[in-house]
Amino acid sequence: MELAIIKYNAGNIQSVLYALERIGMQATVTDDPEAIRSAERVIFPGVGEASSAMQYLRERKLDELILGLRQPVLGICLGMQLMCRFSEENNTTCLGIFNEDVRRFQSSSRDFKIPQMGWNTITGLKTGLFQDVPESSYCYFVHSFYASLGPHTIAVTDYIHPYSAGLHRDNFYGVQFHPEKSAAIGEKIIRNFLEI
Amino acid sequence: MLTKRIIPCLDIKDGRTVKGTNFVDLRDAGDPVELGARYAAEGADELVFLDITATHEKRKTLSELVNRIAHHINIPFTVGGGISSVEDVKVLLQNGADKISVNTSAFKRPDLIRELSSEFGSQCVVVAIDTKLEPDGEWYVYLNGGRVKTETKCIDWARKAVELGAGEILLTSMNHDGTKQGFALDITQKLSAELPVPVIASGGGGTMEHFDAVFREAHADAALAASIFHFREIGIGELKEYLRGKGIPVRS
């Protein structure tokens, strides 16, 4: 299976490549439009800041490219947030695949540190992405911004309040957590994505 | 609910684990990758690899090791030890480290924290602080692995580090480290209450009750230990089961 990982100015991209290798899959980290278009699955990962990432994608017309993809696409963390409509992180207009908005966690209590960093549960699981993934499985999260709940929500996590840990529309999937760092459950979710 | 994290720490020298271990069934107990993978399989939530190599070969050996860890281990890990520049960090992150920790270098040049957080994001910048309670009743910052005392109070440096962009504080009490008499609850509690970022407590964990106390009383977000895990005095699985029984949220 041809797998493309979209290369852009965000961190943590290698981790996704290594996670795929651990389950016996090879992938290409690339920003070449043809390689991305022709891949059977596309992963859009990333840890970083929304506005500089969107600017980078627009300058290289990767935004239009992503919007035009017809094969299954999986956004991870910042990748998922960039697939939303808008992010409060430097008031960034994003790709608009999901019409949920991305907001900053607000906490006045030291019970809720920001960023949320660590393992939290995912519930309300929908779609084949979570096939055979038990409700309340633990996944690894690192983020200060979250996507609100909405019609595209396919997984819910509660930190300060419930928010979207997973989103889905048509061929596009997004997860806020890091499946590539979420032990065996994360590997299961990656395998599911490859089988969608 | 976000869970409390249990973090084994592995000291590394020349690409090998330093402290002995009681793992009888490991093929190579000196191999950080094999030991780390074992901890991950047992339910460790994260790993910390602390490199104490002093030679000039260090950088290459470490980046190769980090690359091997990233290939084999499916949970997040932090790398620390002698990191002093954006370039050092870039190499480690490119090789797959999730976070890096800085200690003495950041204290001597605090702008390093700002540089790292703006270049790579706060989420990957852990500031490690070694602290000691002095007879005057105050906790002071120590440098160079605890050999050099400073006149700066722990809480002041922690606040400044967070202002500069630290995403997490790894707090080691030198009074407690190696004693197995329990974590430093007071200073851990103080930092947890005052800082908006997670605090990892380190030093002194000897029994399962100590972990319960550092989470329940001191509100630590994570607890780190080395030898009690290496010597199989406490298994990570049994520790988590114990904590769950005490009502502490931990990942199963």
Image: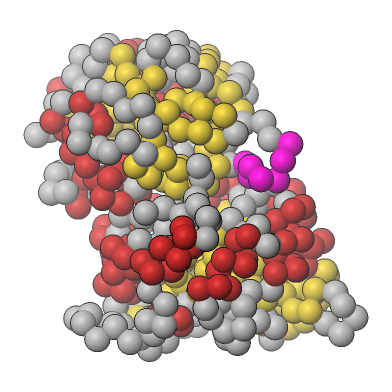
For the residue pair B34 and A71, the one nearer the viewer reads as B34
Looking at the image, residue A116 lies above or below residue A151: below
Question: Is B209 on the left or on the right of A173, as rendered?
Answer: right
Residue under the image location 63 percent in, 42 percent down: A112
Whether A175 is drawn above or below B166: the answer is: above
Q: Is residue B251 above or below residue B16?
A: above
Provide residue A146's location: percent of width, then percent of height. 52, 28
- In the rendered image, residue A35 lying in the magenta stretch gets the answer no
Q: Where is residue A121 shown, x and y percent of the image?
A: 41, 40
Q: Which residues are magenta?
A: A108-114
- Disc tally is 0
Residue A137 in view: yes
Majority secondary structure in the magenta region? loop
| Residue at the (44%, 25%) spot, across then down | A164
Query: What is the quadrant of residue B105 in the picture?
Result: bottom right
Residue A112 is inside the magenta segment: yes
Q: Is residue A54 visible?
A: no
Determine the image quadrant of residue A69: top left
Q: Residue furthest left?
A: A1
Residue beneath the point at 16% across and 26% down: A196
Residue that sits furthest to the front in the current view: B245
The percent position of residue B243, horizontal first and vertical second, equals 49, 62
